[in-house]
Image (cartoon, rainbow, N blue to C red):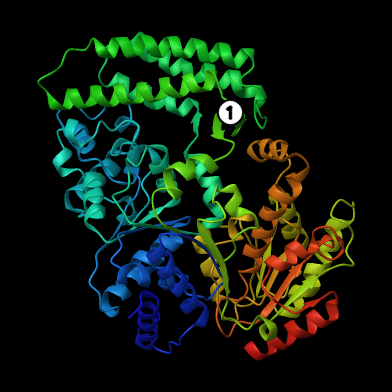
Amino acid sequence: MPPSNRAVAALAKLAGAVPGGERREPQEVMATEVAAAISDGRHLLAQAGTGTGKSWAYLVPAILARKRTVVATATKALQDQLAGKDLPFLQEHLGREFEFAVLKGRSNYVCVQRIAEISGAGQLALDGLADRASPSELTALKLWAASTPTGDRAELSAEPSPQAWAAVSVSAQECPGARKCPSGDACFAEAARRKAGESDVVVVNLHLLGLDLATEGAILPEHDLIVIDEAHQLEDIVSDTCGFELSAGRFQNLARAVRAILDDPGAVDEIESSGSTLTASLHDHVGRRLKGGPDQQIADALTLIRARLDRVAIALRTIPDSSSEDVKTRKDRAVQLTGHLQADLALATSIPDTSVAWVDGPESNPRLRVAPLDIADLLRDKLWDVGPVVLTSATLPPGLSERLGLDGDDHRAIDVGSPFDYEHHGLLYCAAHLPDPRDGGYDAAVHAELLALITAAGGRTLGLFTSYRAMDAAVEALRGQLPGPLLSQRDMPKPALVAAFTEDPATSLFATMGFWQGIDVPGPTLSLVTIDKLPFPRPDEPLLQARREQAKAEAFRTIDLPRTATMLAQGAGRLIRSQVDRGVVAVLDPRLAKAKSYRWILLDALPPFPRTKERGEVEAFLERIDAEAR
């Protein structure tokens, strides 16, 4: 049987193993294309709308083809779904034996060597970290480390304090490696890598994939296929992981490591003061792009700091080899951290034209960030030329393949649609009568529109805003005016907010960009999604600003519009999450109805809802849904 037919037959069998399960044509189409991509060794871009079941659509053909597969996701929620639900189900029902593993960055695992160091006699204040953490919390972490099978931070029943976790973990930049560590044989991070190397499917996040590309494949195990889920975030995440940042925190971390091995208070003080020197030089540049590289003040600070680190590096090299494995490990950690900082400082003093430098963060703790302007060449060399890659998302922005460096002949792009009945279950409303968002009366008009719509819906609303300012203003204007409770993103942590919203249909939840994607609330609790403005990217965002300059006259079409269309579609995608969901997506920005030059690009990215500009039609639709749900 051809691989594509085998995948479709397996999906049909799996559907029968799910209570109330049914075959999904878009899923089968995507699985057929994935099987073909694996057989032909070509790349695939698959847009798969909500409800497709895209996880099975790529996992089933990959497992049946016996291809060692890395699945990279952008969110923890999808990682948890794959590892906790999809892959265990396939192990039980697919009829093909396979093993899977989740691989995380090194700092997510407790370090056995660090535990040994802070547990030894006289070692509690080893590097200044342990003495700032609660002794009872450290004791609890040591007991947990002695019994945990994986050492994964996610296993902890309570989130540890940053000080405590920093005392019992190490970053990739400071770890000397298993061969140089006395606890290397018992290392949890290395055990996770070994398990990943023995598994058929390895689930990672996109940051780890980006680091693997930046380090010449030093992180991920050998594989035949890469699947990039939530691929609309690939460009930004790879740019981030292939760049670097300098902040006071890195110098504080180095000072702790050096203090643990070097008996030279002056050198430690110089490292700590280097953090303050960097902060002072960056203070006046927060929020700015450093065109042409660092100015004279920053350049002088970087030169001074490099000289200090050079002296520290020399001092570390003069430390004689010790018979104590603990001492040797502490020296190796300090050497590692110093070397990484020296390398980044050298790059920061001479930034190439292919990279962008800017300063962000609060003025009290600014960061100098450097990232590549274009990642297409990197992806061509390290990803596209290595083996087949499947990229998938509910929304793939226009022009993505070109920005990622995919040539026309080496990939196929498909859109399998969605199994949901958008035509009969939803409505897209544009409040064309509202003033332009730049008008002084816009906020008041939006608040009046929200009040009318949410009242018709009986609550059941997720209000999405493009800024905290707009969200806060709406909360202040409408709290106490709505038919039910109004929750704000500021009220409680995200999981608790979603739980509270889900439990009470009369509740409305107002939130910003973090809630435009990754929120799944099926059922009658959510029947109205409102979007205050078209989510155009900020004009002063440094990396995008540089890309606009590079694109020149094509900047709006190739940079801004694709991002806006993707984010708008992600926000609208919060509404219909199951076959029975019904509701309205209300865009309160009249430009969606009036902007002739780009409105159809945005509309084509949205689910195929019937469209209206009449609020009365929307209110009647919402009132019927509310009455039926009661």
Crowding near the residue tagged with mark 1, few <14, some 14–19, many ≥20 C-alpha atoms within 10 Å = few
Q: Where is mark 1, residue-wise?
A: 364
Where residue 530 sits in the image (x, y, percent)?
Answer: 72, 67
Q: Quadrant of the C terminus?
A: bottom right
Is residue 264 at all visible to an observer of this figure? Answer: no
Q: Quadrant of residue 50?
A: bottom right
Secondary structure beneath label 1: loop
Between 273 and 518, which is closer to the camera in this rendering?
518
Q: Residue at x 35, y 81 (%)?
A: 10
* 185 sits to left or right of 422: left
* 15 sits to left or right of 223: right
* 234 sits to left or right of 166: right
Between 149 and 473, which is closer to the camera in this rendering?
149
Q: Residue at x 80, y 58 (%)?
A: 598
Q: Quadrant of the N terminus?
A: bottom left
Q: Quadrant of residue 254?
A: top left
Q: Quadrant of residue 95?
A: bottom left
Residue type indicated by callout 1: Ser
Q: Residue at x 36, y 72 (%)?
A: 60
Image: 508 above or below 339? below
Q: Residue at x 56, y 68 (%)?
A: 414
Where residue 315 sits in the image (x, y, percent)?
Answer: 29, 10
Between 355 and 311, which is closer to the camera in this rendering?
355
Where residue 543 sits in the image (x, y, percent)?
Answer: 63, 38
* 41 sits to left or right of 616: left
Q: How many marks?
A: 1
Between 120 and 236, which is closer to the camera in this rendering?
236
Residue at the left extreme of this rendering: 323
Where residue 309 sits in the image (x, y, percent)?
Answer: 40, 14
